[in-house]
Image (tube, rainbow, N blue to C red):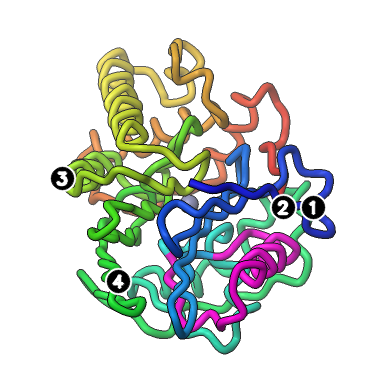
Amino acid sequence: MSSVHLQPHGLVDDNPPPALKELSKGIYAYVQLDGSWGLNNPGFIVGSKGVFLIDTCFTERRSKALKAAIESVTDRPVRTMLNTHHHGDHTWGNYLFPETTIISHRLTREETIQTGLASKAFFPTGNFGDVEVEPAFITYEDKLTAWVDDLRVEIEFLGPAHTTNDSIAWIPDRKLLFSGDLVFNHCTPFIVQGSLVGHLRALQRLRALQPEIVVSGHGDVCGPEGIENGVAYLQFVQDSAQKAWDAGLTPFEAAQKTELGRFGEWHEKERFVANLHRAYSEIRGEPLGMPLSLVNVMEEMIIMNDGQPLRCLA
Ligand SMILES: [Zn+2]
């Protein structure tokens, strides 16, 4: 694996700067550490006639830096893009690729349009620039195969999990998986807009693929242990929620009383309270992925973050 640390204009205050990693011949991850709120990992595959891109970034300057990183390794155009889900840190740079065919699951397109730029409000420190909503305009339902020359990219719908609308891109010939936000590496998973049961099911599917390299949605590139860590965390959420439910506690009370152990060392540990809200919804028997009001949840996360706004370096 080769790795180049980039210092694009405007990102010099990052610590560390984004890194471009060639994981397999022509297949790159664009890693934005430390993977905290808004710092996602796009990826791309360079073919003989063009580039297949997976996701963009949260802010104008970050997506422009991604574009410059692609141009640093090829002069071929970005012909095709996949959005792994609707979250702004994976889609808000789409508009910078006006000549690219953008693909997503049908629900990703719907959520991208419906939620718009509303989540900016949760990140008052975010430097978004002039981002615009540009949803995917080719949608699929269950599975779709994309080709980069003769390299097969298997796109599969695995929602509801992290959100209602998660896709993965699996490259069987290289045993390489772009997991989207189904894997967070040493960052805390976030399921309040998705499903706990569905997420565990999705991770079983990722396990069955037996990837050797996983480009996680956040945090550094990892191996299959990233999937196992996610399973362990989600089972911990499930167990904690059931105990707290049985004891008559609210999710917020439960979060204040629960010792996170090794999961407390991951970024965004305040997401635990949000994840408990999703677990409670499922204990109540509500449909997987049912929308939950985020207002209280965001307030409780801020309290669990020592009263500080959510840490967004984007
Ligand atoms: Zn996400």
> Mark 3: which amino acid?
Ala
Which is closer to the viewer, label 1 or label 2? 2
**Which residue is most to the left?**
208
**Which residue is most to the bottom?**
99
Residue 108: which numbered mark, if any? none
Residue 6: which numbered mark, if any? 2
Choose the circle earlier in sequence order: 1 or 4: 1
Question: What residue is pinned by disc 4?
Answer: 151
Question: What residue is pinned by disc 3?
Answer: 208
SS for tag 4?
A: strand
| Magenta-span inclusion, residue 264 | no
Which is closer to the viewer, label 2 or label 3? 2
SS for tag 3?
A: helix
- Is the residue marked by circle 4 packed among few (<14), some (14-19), or many (20+) residues within 10 Å? some
Choose the circle earlier in sequence order: 3 or 4: 4
- Camera-side residue of 66 and 140: 66
Mark 2 and mark 3: Cα distance apart in space:
35 Å
Choose the circle earlier in sequence order: 1 or 2: 2
Q: What residue is drawn where x is 34% and y is 28%?
A: 229
